[in-house]
Amino acid sequence: MRKAYKNCVIYTGGEVLTNTAVVTRDDKIEILLPDSEIPKDTEIIDLRGRILAPAFIDLQINGGGGVLFNAEPSLNALRIIAKAHEKFGVLSFCPTIVSADSETIQKGIGAIKNAKKENLGIIGAHIEGPFIDVEKSGIHDKSVIRKASDDELKRIISEAEGCVTYMTVSPNSVSGEQIELLTKAGIRVFIGHSNASCEQAVEAFAGGVSGITHLFNAMSGFRSREPGVVGAAFLRDDIYAGIIADGFHVDYNAIIIAKKIKKDKLFLVSDAVSPVGACFDEPNEVFKIGNSEIICEGGKCVNADGVLAGAALDMATAVRNCVNHCKIPLDEALRMAALYPAKAIGLEKLGAVKAGFFADFAVLNGQLYVEAIVRRGEHIIIN
């Protein structure tokens, strides 16, 4: 079925187009052409001046819709989480398995394998820990944090069957040989929750590490005599870095600085937990991460000691925050939510509005709230 989306401002990921229609056939983009040249026998969808952008890609989602994936590593949980985040324009994502025992990791991978058979937009697992540093564990359960063994990594690789996209580790807890083992198996490796030195991080980059998980948070910071993991990330132009733009995890000025340095290698992640999509007006509630009681109030999630525990952030809000608080141009903020995360993990046919790409779009109003989505060519009204 051929459809044409017209009367909109199109952010392709490369340019901004007006008086142009996006023509789709089935689940792919067929062509972009002037409104006046739309082929006959095409279903016309008038977007009435709205913004049409590539659907958002979130590489770090812990939960949503009242569900936390670690607590319920199941196919049903992933269905709920996917539905919660599509309301905010996210049509592709990595469910995150935070530091856990081997059984929970195995269950999470199994659920993701089953979910990939459905059209939920699941890319693959993000395994965040347990091979991290206790000193930078944040809300992660310290009792399960451990150094990686070859046997456990080989078991994860064997179980993954292509369903683990990337792992967050610390160079203190995995060896260079183990990083090579993971990357050869097609699993990308990011540094996070790490107290590593700048020198250690640079060495890990040379050994195959390709990214940083939630830049600035839960890692050795930039200091004059020890630049830490943050400094190492700033040294390398080719290293990608996710960032949580909620105003709590990272000061907006720090995002501005990071953007100046990392340029097109800085991308947005939500680090979303269960309240996202569960209550749209004000996601305030009490929930648990492991044995820790988490209070989420005013969009900020913390435990009793004030330690941040994920984020009550959705991707559309992250984009608005970049535009409104960091003065990042809209076209660039949209790239940070789609094109750059796609490139960070080597996704093809996603992250841009381009002929041959999948017809996955977010339709936003002038205030940058998502009003509709297009999932593989199917137009769905959200608000």
Image: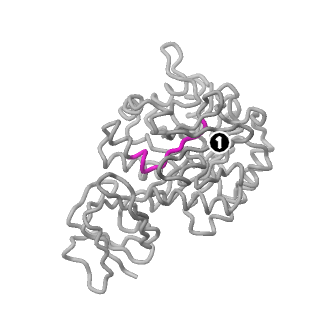
Say which quadrant the N terminus sits in. Answer: bottom left
Residue shown at the point (51%, 13%) measured from the top left: 225
Question: At which x and y percent is residue 298?
Answer: 50, 39
Left or right? Give the position of 138 relative to 369. right
Residue appearing at x 29%, y 62% in the figure: 50
Q: Quadrant of the C terminus?
A: bottom left
* Mark 1 neighbour class, 10 Å CA radius: few under 14, some 14 to 19, many 20 or more: many
Vertically, is 194 above or below 117? Answer: above
Q: Secondary structure at mark 1?
A: strand
- Compared across the picture, whether 58 is left or right of 73 comes to left
Q: Position of residue 281 (x, y in %)?
A: 47, 50
Q: Residue furthest bottom?
A: 41
Magenta-highlighted residues: 309-319
Quadrant assignment, res 27: bottom left
Residue identified by numbered label 1: 128
What kind of colouring is applied to the model shown?
A: one colour
Answer above or below: position of 102 versus 117. above
Hey, which quadrant is residue 180 in on the image?
Answer: top right
Residue 357's place in the image compared with 141, above or below, is below
Compare residues 340 and 333 and report the one nearer the observer.
333
- Give whichever of 238, 123 is nearer the camera: 123
Residue 220, horizontal then vertical, whole percent: 57, 24
Question: In the image, residue 132 lies at what x, y percent?
Answer: 68, 33
Front position in the image: 170 or 130? 130
Q: In the rendered structure, does residue 232 fall within the stretch colored magenta?
A: no
Q: Is residue 375 left or right of residue 118?
A: left
Depicted 219 relative to depicted 380: above or below: above
The image quadrant that residue 114 belongs to is: bottom right
Label 1 sits on what residue type?
Glu
Q: Is residue 313 magenta?
A: yes
